[in-house]
Every structure is written in structure tokens, then in C-alpha cells.
Amino acid sequence: MIVNANSYVSGRVISTDICIIGAGPVGIALALEFKGSGVRVLLVESGGFERSKLLQTVNRAELIGDPYQQPEYTRRRQFGGTSWRWNNADTRPQQPGVRYMPLDSIDFEPREWIPHSGWPFDRASLATYFERAHQFAKLGPYAYSADAWSGPDLQPLQFKGDTLESGAYQFTGYGIYTERREEFEQAENITLLHDATALEISSDDGGTNVTGLLLRSTGGNDFRVSARVVIVAGGGIENARLLLLSRSKQAKGLGNQHDVVGRYFMDHPFYSQGLWIPTDRTIFDRLNYYDTRQVDNYTVLGRLHLSPAVMRREQLRNFSLILYPRRPHTMTAAHNSFMVLWEAATKARRIPKGLTRHATTMLTGLSHLIPLAQQRLNKAYYYHDLEEGGWSTLPNKSALFNAVEIMGQIEQTPHRENRVTLGTSKDSFGQPRPRIYWYFREDDKESIRRARQLITQEFALSGLGKVTWPEALYKNPGTHHHMGSTRMGVDPTMSVVDEDCRVHGITNLYIAGSSVFPTGGYANPTLTAVALAFKLADHLKQTLGVVPQVTANR
Ligand SMILES: Cc1cc2nc3c(=O)[nH]c(=O)nc-3n(C[C@H](O)[C@H](O)[C@H](O)COP(=O)(O)OP(=O)(O)OC[C@H]3O[C@@H](n4cnc5c(N)ncnc54)[C@H](O)[C@@H]3O)c2cc1C
């Protein structure tokens, strides 16, 4: 059933068994797990089915620290949540879809060189939930090793040392979550209540039980939900913010008796322009494994990452590499400046920083740009098209390419002072905006510098060629993967939720999403967040005494 909250009059009270706040990928997957179970589920969503400019401003945060992307633009308030941003032109629509992989096994381990690391369970114990997440997202088999995706013509690189290993990403199309509206229309025991923003979670005087929510419709009517169980699934910033906003009975916010809510916030900084100049250009005929390609109708992309052995020995954070063959001339300053100006003109549609500098660099490097323009006119493969995949099918690659660009995501340490708090400015509901303190700290910088050295040495030792790195340690501060602000752990003084995602000290309040990750590795987080949602669904079914269904709800 689908209901628009604007049809409710002020003061109304809605009663349900489970109330889930947020219809993004995580809330949608979680709610549909209860289809046909007999449990009454209310899925509350701030937005509707279209993008609303006004609601987007509710995501605006006060940003403090190193430059960080504004969530007003990287989060979406709408049924389907931020998966709508996966469709946005800014995310390069020519890419093959959404990238998935589970966090690596080592990401779950307590690593004595990374303060506050360690999940309460290992990755293997989530295997069945990852498999269910795969079915839900219509992915291929739950397999991410190089062995699973290599073949006679698809061989990963062979290294002499133990610094690097190969693995794979999988992709699905964009509509996996946004196109599930019909399932909610048909589900008798699930109500999707849209245009309803949760302003506060209500609790009893002691703050040990939650009783429901205070909500406001987009039209401005206030009403309440009374629920046996409340699950917050509003995304990696809003989850912390809503606990902090729930302070009628607990002055510091729900679950925040030890001042942990909002702390240890992390993202995955993204770097590009690492450059590998192969010694032997015939290598381009043997790099197919690292192209985006179809295997048994599934889309996969080969990647490299630091080996667990080297991370342990050198005390490093996790680090990933994706390889893109490049043409001569594309790795020049003139081409970089051209790309900055091109993207400013065609995508951002605003004057870029350093306009004069970039224009001068471009003009003085015309000798590099003219051959590229000629290739473009001849409809030859060009810069961005390579990320769509398919370069490995081109003929005569050793003449076509001379360099490989290396890019990838990096693990960020959970730092107590990187955090989400309440700011001083207010959103359109009159609520304090989130304030994000985000700093990229020295231990993370040091880890990147050392990882780069080791990778350069490994390529040289293996006779593969020369690898160099740009001066900047990262290009983007994050990949919009908001993690850690309601972290999981066994110690209530150091974490917000327990291994069942239940808020410490509160019997019936749970958190779903990447905000519960105590560490985040470099993997795109949605697959792990959805797997944890299925684990939570099983826990709640057991707690509420739901009889298991024979038919799968997928
Ligand atoms: C450009 C871009 C590309 C990305 N690419 C990838 C990728 O390739 N792979 C990957 O794994 N991840 C990717 N991500 C990250 C991914 O989008 C998130 O991990 C995922 O959306 C998190 O799902 P979620 O349901 O927890 O939160 P969200 O998707 O943010 O959804 C939260 C929902 O909760 C609602 N909500 C929030 N607060 C309230 C409230 N108080 N009351 C009611 N409703 C509320 C919001 O309106 C929203 O609909 C990308 C993100 C961006 C921006």
C-alpha cells in the first residue's frame, strides 16, 4: 500500500509493528523482507516519487575541516533514496551501472595499527546475507576473487612480490531500488508513507524503549507513529542526525549517553592520475581482465588491491586500483586543463577555478591536443569512453595505447573527531542542520605515501614498467560513501549499536545502513549495507516470532 502523508490531518496517530525511516536502497530492501509475513511494516519516506528542490535543501550540511562534498547534492530525498544519484548525468551515464563488492575480509578484523578497527563478527558469517543481497540486486554469483572471473584470455597480472592482488567488481543497472514502487502497491502488510519526514524518535522517560515518531508532512501537518520497533535507515549522515535530534527525553540525543553518536565518520577518498608506463606495449593485449566486460551476462571489472600480507607487514590502510589504458597525449598537463574546462562548460556549467591558468596551459600544449581532436573526429576511442568498457576488444592496442591511468578508492581511518553533530543553522522544518567535521589526517596520508612507494616498487620488480603518482594524495575527498557515524561494537562506550544493529541500552531501536560500519575499507558500501539489512530482518523476525515463509520476497 502507498499513502501520501499529506492526506493525514494533524494530530493523527498511526499504529504499526515495525516503522522504518527512509526508503533508500537499505530501507526498501529491509521493508520488502517482511512482505507477506503478517507483521505490519510502515516505511516512512521524507520525499515522494519526484525530486523536490525544497526537500533537497534539508540535506544541506554545515561543513568544517578539509573540503568535503555538500550532501545537499550527493544525497537524495525521494523514494529510492540516493540511488537516484546513480542516474544523474554527473555520475557519467556512460558507465556500466552501479559498482558492487563486499568489504574485504581484513576490513572486518581488529587491526592493531588502525585505532578503533574491528567488527564484532567476520565477513564469512555474513555470507548468506551477501548471497541474498546478490539476489535482491540481480547480481551474478557471490564471487569477487580473480579466480572466479579469469579465464584463458582473461589473466590477472602476475607480480613477483606480494604487494598486490587482483579481484573484481560487479555491476548492475541503475533501477534496482527506484523501480520497486509496484511491489509496495501490492504488499498488503507494508505501507509506504511518503512525503513524511521524521522529526524526532519518541521514547519513554528512561530512554530505554522507543515508542514511535513525530512526523511532519511536506504540507506541514504534524502526526505521530506508534511502533513496537523503530529502525532508522535515513543514510550515513541523517541516521546520526535523527538520534541527536531526539532529545525530548534524553538531552544528548538517543543512544548518545557516551557521546559516540556522529563520531568516527568516514568516506572513501578517490584518487586518479597514477600513471603506469609499461615496459612492453604488448601488455595491452594481455590486460583484458581489467576491462569492464560481460561474463555470462553479468558485468564485471577487474581491480587490484593491496594484499592482506603487505597491509599487515607495513601497517597500511586498504587501497584499491583500477586500470584504464590511455592514449599518448591524454596524460599531459594540456589535456588535464582541457578536461577541467570541458567539464566546467558541459557538466558543472560554471566558470572553473583557475580559468586563465588552464586556458594558458591548454594553448601552450596544443601539439598534444590536436592529435586527440583528430582521433575524436575520426570517431576513434577517446578519454571517457574507456570507462564504459570495451577497450580490450579494440584491434591493435599496443599501437593505440602507451600508458595506463591508475585510479581508485582508499580506506579512511575512523577518527573520533571526524564527526556529524547538530549545527546552528536550521532546515525548512526548523530543525538544526547536520554539521560535518571532516579532516584527512596524517596517518591516512602516510599510509597512502607508503602504499604508492610499494606499488611502484612492485611494478618495477615484476618488470612491468614505471609507475608515478600525482602530487595530490587524493582528487575527491569522498565517493559519497557516508560511513561510521553510528558505529557497531560490543563496548557501549565506544559504539552506538550492537552486532544486531540495536542501539545500546534501548530495547527496540535499530539502525540500518553504512553508518553502522566501524571501518569501511575501500569497497562501495551498498552491498554490505543491504546484507546487514537482511541480517537485521532475520533478527527481527525471530524477535517478533514471525513464521518463516517458503517463498522468497525478491
Ligand atoms: C554519485 C553517487 C554514486 C554512488 N555510487 C555507488 C556505487 O557505485 N556503489 C555503491 O555501493 N554505492 C554508491 N553510492 C553510495 C550509495 O548511494 C549509498 O551507499 C546508498 O544510497 C545508501 O543507501 P541508504 O538507503 O542507506 O541511504 P540513502 O540512499 O541516502 O536513502 C536514505 C533515504 O532516507 C530518507 N530520509 C532521510 N532522513 C529521513 C527522515 N528524517 N524522515 C524520513 N525519511 C528520511 C531520504 O529521503 C532517503 O530517501 C553512490 C553515491 C553517489 C552520490
Image (tube, rainbow, N blue to C red):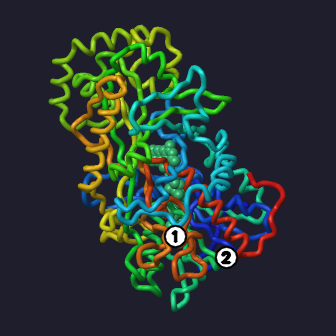
Under mark 1, the amino acid is Gly
Q: Is residue 343 left or right of residue 554?
A: left
Mark linked to residue 388: none
Foreground pick, 164 / 171: 164
> Which mark is first along the chain, 2 or 1?
2
Q: Farthest residue toward the right?
A: 550
Q: Residues within 10 Å of mark 2 (few under 14, many from 20)?
A: some
Q: Residues within 10 Å of mark 1 (few under 14, many from 20)?
A: some
Can the viewer see residue 131?
A: yes
According to the image, label 2 marks what residue? Answer: 14
- Locate residue 264: give its quadrant: bottom left
Q: Residue at x 70, y 68 (%)?
A: 41
Considering the image in quadrants, where does the N terminus appear? Answer: bottom right
Separation of marks 1 and 2 at Cα, in angstroms: 17 Å
According to the image, label 1 marks what residue? Answer: 220
Can you tell me whether the CB of the residue at mark 1 lies under 8 Å from the nearest atom of ligand 1?
A: no
Foreground pick, 35 / 423: 35
Residue 127: percent from the left, percent from the top? 64, 54
- Locate residue 176: give its quadrant: top right
* Disc 1 + disc 2, Cβ < 8 Å: no
Q: Secondary structure at mark 2?
A: strand
Q: Residue at x 27, y 44 (%)?
A: 450
